[in-house]
Every structure is written in C-alpha cells, then in structure tokens.
Image: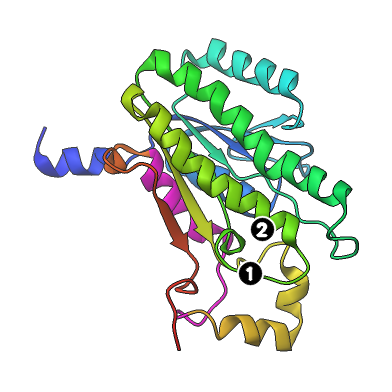
Amino acid sequence: MSNKNKEEKSFSVDGMIVIVTGAGRGNGYSIADGLSRLGGKVFGLDIRFEKGECSFAQIECDITNEEALKSVISMINKAEGRIDGLVNNAGITMSPENCYSRNTFEKTISVNTLAPLRLSWMLAELMKKQGKGSIVNITSLGAHLGFPDNPAYQASKAALSQITKSMAMDYGSCGIRVNSVCPGYIVTQMTQASFDDPEKRKERQKRMMLNRWGRPEDLVGPCAFLLSDASEYVTGAEIPVDGGWLAKGF
C-alpha cells in the first residue's frame, strides 16, 4: 500500500461500528448522518426519532436507563462482533426559571454527565477486550466560560470535559482513546430562539473570529478525525469547534 493510500485510510471511518447518542435531531442527527455517509455503520440512540428514512440505524433508548443501555450494547455487539467508537452527544438544557433548583441540577446532570459516564465505561470495558476503541464527548463553551441563568448545564459539561481526561488516563494503556469536541453556538432547536433574535444573534456572532454561527455539519469532520486512526496518538484532548470564540481576545 502506498503512503498516500495509507494516509487516506487513516482518516477513514469506513466500516467502523459507531454509536451516537442524541441522534434524533440537531447536532446528534448531523453527526450520525455524516459519519454514516462517510462509510461508518452508525447506530443512533435517542428517546424518539422523526419519522422518515435515515442513513443510520435508529434505536429508541433512554440513555439514563442503564439496563436499556446494556441491552442495546449487547444487541449491537452481538450483531456486529465489535463496537469501534462512541460519540456522547445527547444533552439537555432546562428553562432559566428555577435554574438553581435541585430538580434542574439532577435532571441535567443525569443526562449530560452520568449517562455518558456510564455508557463510556460500559463500552470502554468492551473495547478493552478488543484492544482498541475511540470515545468522543461533546462538551460546550459552557464547560469553560460563564454564561447566565444556566449553572446546571455549565457544571454538567465541565464535568464531562474532566471525565474525558480521567478516562483517557485510565484506559490509554488499553488502546482506548477518549477526547472531546467543544462546540460553540451552533444553529439547532436548542439555540434557535437566540439565533432568531437579531440582537442576540449579532451579539454572539461578534465573539466568533469566523463571523458566523456554526452548523451541525461542522461537527462531523472533527468527530470523524477523533474516531479514525488519523488521531491514534491523540487522547485526553478537547477540540474547540466554535468559530474561534474561546481563543478570541479583543
């Protein structure tokens, strides 16, 4: 095989068995669809899906239900013989009303932190037997910066960012890599209200070096890179996909 062919293959997710959570809409749907179109065999998990044809397998599953997760993992592993990658994308943000309440924190942490932690651990133990695997966590600008009226979301994503480093340390010797992608403001149903408000849209866009809001498909390439062998010496890292927001000064 020529060096060129080796390089092209190293960037490929062709034939990889990948689970993507929160794949029913928004960023998760685009990541699952994009990886599928790049040749991956993708299993998208969500509590519900829109009707219609889709490029990837859709599995209705509440990711906060550990027994349901175990069943799904077992089913996929039995059918495919292995699971190569995981993208922990599922996440919720709740109303700013009562944003400091116990209920808000418990619900947010349950979906955004505990669910990806448990799913990652289950798959890491499976991948350990395979001798190889890649886990990608989708974090947020809120893991690094202060934003108003949403402490639970920011705490949940900051915790997930640190879990990335911790698991990378624990499983690196087993051939398993754990990394994060940190999106900026991406136009999805979660951010649509801010985008539709001209003042808020302009205010946020000023923070972006690239002077535009992100699109869900902007996350596909970074996820594909971190899942593929092209990043085989990358672990415990976080890639901002934020149009330059985190790096911008004046």
Distance of mark 1 from mark 2, alpha carbons? 8 Å
Compared to residue 8, the image places residue 243 above or below, namely below
The residue under the point 48% across, 42% down is 164
Q: Residues within 10 Å of mark 2 (few under 14, many from 20)?
A: many
Q: Which residue is mark 2?
A: 154
Q: How many marks?
A: 2
Give the labeled residue for mark 1: 146
The image quarter containing residue 20 is top right
Q: Residue at left 66%, top 17%?
A: 70
Check disc 1 and give the amino acid type.
Gly
Amino acid carrying label 2: it is: Gln
* Residue 146 percent coordinates (x, y): 63, 69
Q: Is residue 138 left or right of residue 244?
A: right
Residue 33 seen in the figure: no
Q: Secondary structure at mark 2?
A: helix
In the rendered image, residue 223 lying in the magenta stretch gets the answer yes
Q: Main secondary structure of the magenta part?
A: helix
- Magenta-colored span: 209-227
Q: Is residue 66 above or below residue 242?
A: above
The one nearer the camera, 90 or 8, is: 90
Answer yes or no: is residue 108 visible: yes
